Amino acid sequence: MELRDAVYIDGVRVPIGRARPDGYYGSTRADDLAVRTIRALLDRNPGLDPARVDDNAWAATTQQGDQALTLGRTAAILSGLPTSVPGYAVDRMCAGALTTITNAANAIRVGAQDVVIAGGVEHMGHHPMGQGVDPNPRFLSEQLVGTDALVMGLTAENLHDLHPGITRRRADEYALQSQERVAKAQAGGVFDDHVVRMQVWSPDGWRVVATDEHPRPGTTLEALAALRPAFRPGGRVTAGNSAGLNDGAGCVLLTSRQAAQDMGLKPRMRLVDYAFVGVEPETMGWGPVPATEKLLARNGLSIGDIDAIEMNEAFAVQCIAFLDHFGLPVDAPHVNPYGGAIAMGHPLAMSGARLTQQLAHALTARDDARLGMTTLCVGLGMGCSVLWEKI
C-alpha cells in the first residue's frame, strides 16, 4: 500500500503559565485550556469544516481530575465540535503531544482518516508530576531501575557525570542563551504566529493573558551562577538551567493533501518519518541522541541536512550533550532559534505541540530551509525525534 502524505496546516497554544496558585491558570481548568486551543484552531481556519474532523487526539501525563475522562472526547464536546467527532487520550510523558501528532499522521498516511486535531495539555499546578502515582516496588527491589530514575533532576545530574566536559558554567551559559533567544523572539513577534490569548480568573477578577509567564528577562550569568543545586549537594542542575513546572495546552491540525485542497487550507510541512527509542532511565536526557541517529540513518541523512531543530530543553545538560555528540556549536543558530523550555517552561505533554509550531515558523522564515526536526527526551528513559519537510 502506498502511503499518503500527512501535512501540517496550523497549530496554536495558550501562553504558558507558572504552576502555582497565583500563576496564570491557578483558577482555570486543564480541559478549558485544551478547549481554548481547539476553538482558536477552528477560528483561524474558517475553511475547515468541523464535521470533517475524523479524530481529536490529546495527551496528558497525569490523567486525573480536570485532565482525565478520555480528554480527547470530552474536549471535542466542550469545544463545540460535532458529536460525530471521536477522541482519545494518550500518555508518553514529555512526548505526549508528539505521540498524538505521529498517531494522527499515521492514520492519515494509511488512509483511515483525513483530518485530525492532535495536541497535549498539562496543568502541573493542579496535578504535580507524579501525583497519585504508585510505582511498582519491583522497580527498586529487583533493581530494574536505579532510585535516580524516578527523579528527573537526578537523571540530569547523572548525565553531567557521564559528560564531565559539560560543566556547570556551560549549562548556565546555555540557560542564559535560552532566555535571551526567547526575549528576542517575543520582541520580534515570533510567537504571535501561534500563541492565542486566554481569558482567566484571578483574585483581582477576569483578565486576558497573552504572553508566556515563565521567561525571566534580564537574567544574567552571575545570577544563574549564584543559584544553589536543586537535586544533590555539589550538583550542577539548578532551577536556572532546568525547565520550569508549568501549565499549558497546544494542538495542531493535520490533514491529507487532498483534504487540504478540498477545504482551501494551505499545508506548511509534511511529516516525513519519526523514531521513538528507549535509553537507560537513569540518564533519560540522552534519549534525543539515539532517536535522532535512528531517524537520520533510516532516511539516509546526516545532521548537516537538517536546517532547523527544535528540542524541549528539559535540562541544559540534555541539550549540550546532544549538540556535542553531533558536533554542533552550543550557539548553533538553527537549533532552538527562539529559545526553549528553560525560559518558556515545560508543561510535559503539551511541549511537543509547541516544538512543532515553532519549527513550522522557523522553516517558513527561511527561504533556504527544507528539512526540520522536533526532538525531546522523555521520562523513564525514552527519546523521540520527528522529521518534517517544508512544503
Image: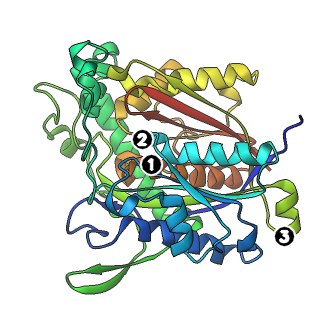
Amino acid of disc 2: Met
Is 338 situated above or below 265?
above
Q: Earlier in the sequence, mark 3 or mark 1?
A: 3
Residue named by callout 2: 93
Point out which mark residue 349 bears: 1
Front position in the image: 171 or 115: 115
- Residue 350, image x and y in percent? 46, 52
Disc 1 from disc 2: Cα separation: 6 Å
Is 37 situated above or below 232?
below
Q: Secondary structure at mark 1?
A: helix
Work out which quarter of the rendered image holds the N terminus and state it.
top right
Which residue is rendered at x = 88% and y = 67% of the image?
Answer: 262
Point out which mark residue 264 bears: 3
Q: Is residue 345 left or right of residue 250?
A: left
Is 50 situated above or below 298?
below
- Residue 49, image x and y in percent? 75, 74
Q: Is residue 243 left or right of residue 193?
A: left
Q: Earlier in the sequence, mark 2 or mark 3?
A: 2
- Residue 59, image x and y in percent? 49, 51
Q: Are marks 1 and 2 in contact (CB under 8 Å)?
A: yes
- Residue 354, image x and y in percent? 52, 53
Point out which mark residue 290 bears: none
Q: Is residue 284 left or right of residue 296?
A: left
Disc 2 from disc 3: Cα separation: 35 Å
Q: Secondary structure at mark 2?
A: helix
Which residue is rendered at x = 76% and y = 44% of the image?
Answer: 368
Front position in the image: 269 or 365: 269
Q: How many labels were placed on the picture?
A: 3
Amino acid of disc 3: Gly
Amino acid of disc 1: Ala
